[in-house]
Image: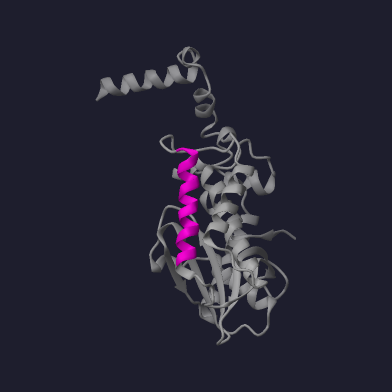
Amino acid sequence: MAAYSHSQLSTFEQCPLRYRFKYIDRIPAPEETTAEAFMGSRVHETLEKLYEGLKYEKTYSLDDLMEYYAGQWRRNWSARIRIVKPELREENFHDYGARCIRNYYQRYHPFTQSQTLSTEQRVSFHLSSEGRFAMRGYIDRVARRSDGTYEIHDYKTGGRLPDQASVDSDRQLPLYEIGLRSLWKDVERVDLFWHYLGFDFTLISRRSPEQLENLSRETEDLISRIEACPSFPPVKSALCDWCEYRPVCPLWKHVVAVEAMPPEVVAEDAGVQLANEYAEVKRRIE
């Protein structure tokens, strides 16, 4: 039986065709990851190193972490990593990631707010008591306060800061909470932390048992829709610019092919000529 993740469900909601390419057909991505995703991975690695050290009474200085971050960046960066926005350069993403780490370190040092139990904690559970609707995921950090409250922490490196209502209705961390409750039986209270590192801002939310039950049912319904889906149509949106399957998507593959052509060849392309003809007719009509 297939196990679903939050990112997998979100992919289907955003674009069913990308979901099919990635999770059903398992087509290798024609492109490398984007600079945003690369930077997020390096930031997560650095914060994981911070808390893994603290578990063994090792406190890294901010300079230590910055050195580690820079080293991971150098070792993993390649020319194939795609920068979507042409006005940005590699160093812009590097410096933004460094700011994310610096913001977090300076806000939470000396990191005694709670005891870290695990980083990159894998959770695997079923939404249904009959063993259906398997879910899986990885929690950035699980911690517990002295009063017994558990904490689920997630690090966000994106360039958008949501409001409180958005995280209060978000699906990702509450699903992790369901998984956490199946992992450790003494879990009573759970606080959910979204760390928006670039903004030096943290949003905290909590779910009632009734809300978790409703989330389970809604997620079961979504999985049932996916499994009964007769076709997986592409959906055009602003997210297309960051999609790794853009070169093979029927909505974009001609655009990508034209972008790679020399200027003298572009003018002879039948699709380009048709588009230019259409634009001229439209101009005359207007």
> Is 94 part of what is drawn in magenta?
yes
Residue 12, image x, y percentages: 57, 52
Nearest the eye: 204 or 175: 204
Extreme-left residue of the structure:
286
Residue 92 rendering spot, x and y as whole percentages: 45, 43
Q: Which residue corresponds to the image point at 62% horizontal and 61% vertical from the top-left? A: 49
Q: Is residue 46 magenta?
A: no
Q: Would you place residue 114 above or below residue 248 in this image?
A: below
Image coordinates for residue 135, horizontal then vertical, percent: 66, 65
Residue 234 seen from this side: no
Magenta segment main secondary structure: helix
Image position of 219 with respect to 39: above or below: below
Depth check, front residue: 35 or 29: 35
Rendered residue at 59%/42% (across/down): 33
Farthest-out residue, bottom: 147
Image quadrant in which the N terminus is located: bottom right
Q: What colour scheme has been applied to the protein in the rendered image? A: one colour
Which quadrant would the C terminus be assigned to in this image? top left
Residue segment shown in magenta:
89-106
Question: Which x, y percent locates residue 116?
Answer: 61, 74
Where 180 sits versus 197, above or below? below
